């Protein structure tokens, strides 16, 4: 199931990485504190295309087999294994459409297109999360660096990293992976 990803990765191995290196941190699959309502909808897979994951349910308790089936190999690798898509290969780095960027795993709203800007990195970049609580920042010490890992606060999916070289008004750069996101054109 990862053959597609392997091919894509080896093809463009020389793409500039900038400040975002591949980080296979194995422990980065989240277990949100509020996973008390652990009723995973196993059996029937949720309708991924329309993101009909019930709010408040199944938080942080997605079934691994279900995710492997529902997500593309790259989406799985990035969100569940803290992978990084190659720069300039994702579907959103050069996307200027209006809408809300949602978590590809749990459909939580993460970023607004209003805060998206062209960082020149080849990854979709935002200067602010849609809500301060939507994106959780964790310390990432993989690859001999100390970085700020950005994960979905609801399900723990790896999104990318946050850096401090962004534009005004926040000066922050949320360097995201397209594979972690789904653009919902119907802005609230
Ligand atoms: Zn999520």
Image: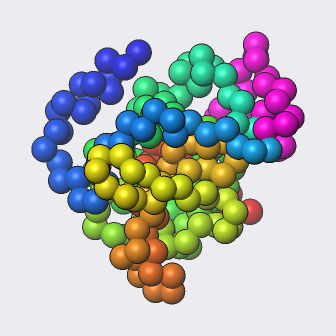
Image vertical order of residue 31 relative to residue 19, above or below: above
User: For the image shown, how many numbered marks are present on the structure?
Assistant: 0
96 in the magenta segment = no
| Observer-nearest of 13 and 22 | 22
Picture coordinates of residue 147, whole percent (x, y):
40, 59
Residue 67 at least partly seen: yes
Q: Is residue 67 left or right of residue 31?
A: left
Quadrant for the N terminus, please.
top left
Picture coordinates of residue 183, whole percent (x, y):
56, 52
The image quarter in which residue 128 lies:
bottom right
Picture coordinates of residue 142, whole percent (x, y):
36, 46
| Observer-nearest of 178 and 171 | 171
Task: Write the residue at 80% across / 44% down.
Answer: 34
Image vertical order of residue 103 relative to residue 167, above or below: above
* Most distant residue in the left direction: 14
Q: Is residue 11 left or right of residue 54?
A: left
Image vertical order of residue 54 relative to residue 137, above or below: above
44 in the magenta segment = yes
Task: Write the residue at 45% across / 60% down.
Answer: 148
Residue 50 at least partly seen: no
| Magenta stretch bounds | 35-58
Picture coordinates of residue 141, whole percent (x, y):
39, 51
Quadrant for the C terminus, please.
bottom right
* Figure colour scheme: rainbow
Task: Write the residue at 17% across / 39% down.
Answer: 12
Dominant SS type (magenta): loop
Task: Write the residue at 85% across / 36% down.
Answer: 36
Quadrant of the displayed image that contains ligand 1: top right
| Observer-nearest of 186 and 89 | 89
Q: Is residue 138 left or right of residue 32?
A: left
């Amino acid at each position: 199931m990862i053959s597609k990803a392997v091919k894509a990765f080896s093809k463009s191995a020389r793409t500039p990485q900038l400040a975002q290196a591949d980080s296979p941190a194995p422990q980065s699959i989240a277990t949100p504190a509020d996973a008390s309502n652990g009723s995973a909808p196993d059996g029937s897979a949720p309708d991924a295309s329309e993101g009909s994951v019930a709010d408040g349910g199944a938080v942080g308790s997605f079934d691994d087999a279900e995710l492997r089936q529902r997500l593309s190999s790259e989406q799985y690798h990035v969100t569940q294994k803290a992978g990084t898509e190659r720069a300039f290969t994702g579907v959103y780095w050069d996307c200027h459409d209006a809408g809300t960027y949602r978590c590809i795993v749990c459909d939580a709203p993460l970023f607004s297109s209003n805060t998206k800007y062209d960082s020149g990195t080849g990854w979709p970049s935002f200067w602010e999360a849609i809500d301060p609580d939507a994106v959780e920042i964790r310390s990432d010490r993989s690859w001999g660096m100390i970085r700020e890992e950005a994960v979905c606060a609801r399900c723990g999916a790896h999104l990318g990293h946050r850096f401090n070289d962004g534009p005004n008004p926040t000066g922050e750069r949320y360097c995201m992976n397209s594979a972690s996101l789904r653009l919902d054109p119907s802005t609230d």
